[in-house]
Image (cartoon, rainbow, N blue to C red):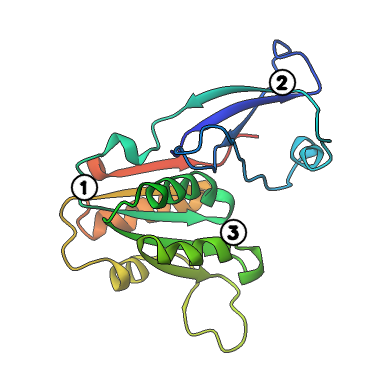
Amino acid sequence: PGQFAWVTVRVSPWAMREHPFSIASSAEHPDRLEFTVKERGDFTRAVGRLESGERVYVDAPYGAFSVDRHGDAAGFVFVAGGIGIAPILSCLRTLADRGDPRPVVLYYANDTLERAAHAAEIDALRARLHLRIVPVLLHPPAGWDGERGYVTREVLDRHLPACRRGLEFFVCGPKPMTALVERELHALGVSAWHVRTELFDLV
């Protein structure tokens, strides 16, 4: 869970035109491979126009952004920015499929509520996980009483458990967000040894 794949479509797999995508599906269901793709550039816009039956080359898995590398963790804290939810969704789905009882906190930052991918499914996972969700909106709707702005030290501190020993932290999103969260976690006394980051800057 949490790893990524190199994907090539409509050209030879040796054409050096592969694109990285985080795997969003559960590791407990290897028969189904899912990706969450944000339409930003020419290639990602073309993905939505693929037809059933087209050949896709997938080279995977890669990466170290995985809860499976920390089997002795007391719990997990995830911080996702926008489409950075993709590898974290894989971790959440996998933990739920395994019936993992450990506590999980998810900070999910988006510009608006409408842009929060998979929000309904993530909310439903609370029935299967010991999961606390902290949505953080840059432009919240009227009447919003949740967190707003950025994932700052104060936002983190308000929702982290009092006992943070043994927790493993995973941060995925745009580079400015991950850099901010790393600094704020350090200010809260979280060792860099327990923080993993994945940047969504490759195109």
Using the rendered view, name the quadrant where residue 105 is placed.
bottom left
Residue closer to the observer: 82 or 201: 82
Question: In this rendering, would 45 be left or right of 111?
Answer: right
Q: Which residue is mark 3?
A: 118
Q: Quadrant of the N terminus?
A: top left
Q: Position of residue 170 (x, y in %)?
A: 37, 47
The mark nearer the N terminus, 3 or 1, is 3
Q: Where 20 sits versus 145, above or below?
A: above
Residue 35 in the image: x percent, y percent?
A: 62, 41
Name the residue: 61% across, 40% down. 34
Tell me which amino acid carries mark 2: Arg
Query: Quick one: SS at disc 1?
Result: loop
- Pick the quarter of the image with the C terminus: top right
Quadrant in the picture for residue 121: bottom right
User: Is 44 located above or below residue 163 in the figure?
Assistant: above
Q: Nearer the viewer, mark 3 or mark 1?
A: 3
Q: CA distance from mark 1 to mark 2?
A: 38 Å
| Mark 2 neighbour density, 10 Å: few (under 14) some (14–19) many (20 or more) | some
Which label sits in the foreground, 1 or 2? 2
Disc with the residue nearer the chain's start (1 vs 2): 2
Q: In front here: 37 or 97? A: 97
